[in-house]
Structures are given as structure tokens and as C-alpha cells.
Image (cartoon, helix red, strand yellow):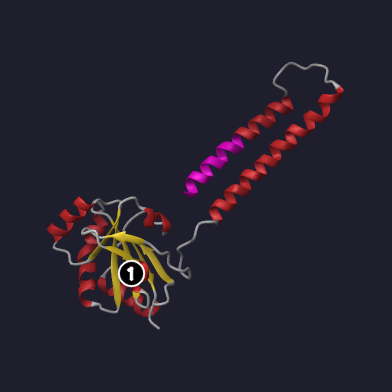
Amino acid sequence: MHVLLIEKAIHLLLILGYALYKIEVGVFPPRKIKAGERMGKKIVPLFVIIAAFGILGFLMNGLGGKASANPGDKAIEFELKDIYGKKYKLSDFNGRTVVLNFFATWCQPCIDEAPELEAFGKDYKNAKLLIIAKGESTMRMKKYISESNSKLTYLLDTKEDTSKAYNVVGQPETVIIDKNGLIVHRFSGPTTKDNLIDLIEKKASP
């Protein structure tokens, strides 16, 4: 969303800048300017400048209007379904430490990391691990879960709305949320069971 806003703003600013240039240098051959036209020549560049500032203001407002998902921020609520159609909300786990792991079946680092997450989910009971299946379909996830015999909770983020809300571009990416619903840590790249437990104990424990 941020990229689209920036691209649109730059495009419009370039158009306005070109229009201002044409007004200043003159598109047509020089001619005698009538008295009534002098004011118009001054007003048009002023209008272009005001429009440019308006676009910049729109851009800043658009960027500032989106909630951030950085350490110290309140975790962004979401509602996603698992492969069986059951709905899960982040708020379902209020009062618990939650780990979000953004995953894709075609991502080799995600596949390499999977056994560690499986062990974490099985052995560590002081946090709820939710695997956000980024851009994945129900069919692909059913196939993956069946073949890997995974017992973890996979939530379908097929349209990547939750991934975008959390500013996730690549994967795997992990977000740790404490019992108060605050993001306390996030990082990119694969992790291990022991590393994840260590981070939770240091950053999310009371």
C-alpha cells in the first residue's frame, strides 16, 4: 500500500512539474500578453504549487494512517480460517503469549525451519504458535499438512491481508506478542525451538 501511494504521488508530481515547466517557458511562440493575462500567468503556477503540496499532504496522511507492527506497538487484530473453515482471532488468545510465524509452502527456509517449530509447538506450552500461511490456498495447505504430518495451527492468509497489515514482505518471519497484546520482538529468517523459547523468556515473560 505504501509503495502504491508513493508511486502515484511521484507520478502526479512529475506531471505537475512538467506542467509548471511548460507554463514558465511557454508552449507557444512568444506573443504580446494582454493586461488581463498577466494575473492568469501568476495564478496558474501558484495553483500547481498548491496542488503539489496537496499531493504531498495526501501521501503523508496515507503513510501515517496505517497502523505499524513494530516492537512496542499493539498487535493488530485479525480473523483467519484454518483449513477446516474454523475462524481464529488474535483476541481469542488474550492473556497468553502468542507467536506468529509467517510461512509459505514454496519457501525452502520455511520448510527447513518447520521441524523446529513442530518441536516448539509440542514441547513449549507457555505460548500459542500460529502459523500464518501467506498467500496459500486451502488445497495446498491440506496437502502440505498431510505430507508433513504437522500438528500445528495453520491459518490461511490467502489474500495476504494480515501479512500486509504486519508489514511482512518475505518469509519466514516471526512476531512475538506478549500477554498484554504488545509486540515485543520480530525477526526475519528461520529460527530454532531453543532460540524461540529463549526470546520469549527474555522479552515476553512478566
The part of the image, by quadrant, that contains residue 34 is: top right
**Where 78 falls versus 30 (above or below)?**
below
Count of numbered marks: 1
Kindly identify the residue that appears in the image at 59 percent across and 51 percent down: 60
Q: Callout 1, which amino acid?
A: Val
9 falls in the magenta region: yes
**Where 175 falls versus 199 (above or below)?**
above
The residue wearing badge 1 is 99
131 falls in the magenta region: no
Magenta span: helix, strand or loop, mainly? Answer: helix
Drawn side of residue 117 relative to residue 57, left or right:
left
The part of the image, by quadrant, that contains residue 166 is: bottom left
Q: Nearer the viewer, residue 95 or 125?
A: 95
Residue 132 position in % (x across, y down): 30, 60
Kindly identify the residue that appears in the image at 46 percent across and 69 percent down: 74
Please provide the residue range marked out in magenta. Answer: 1-14
Drawn side of residue 9 relative to residue 185, left or right:
right
Kindly identify the residue that appears in the image at 23 percent across and 72 percent down: 121
Residue 175 position in % (x across, y down): 37, 66
Drawn side of residue 187 relative to residue 107, left or right:
right
Q: Nearer the viewer, residue 128 or 22?
A: 128
Residue, far bottom = 206
Residue 155 position in % (x across, y down): 28, 60
Residue 46 position in % (x across, y down): 74, 37
- Location of the C terminus (image quadrant): bottom left
Q: Nearer the viewer, residue 132 or 103?
A: 132
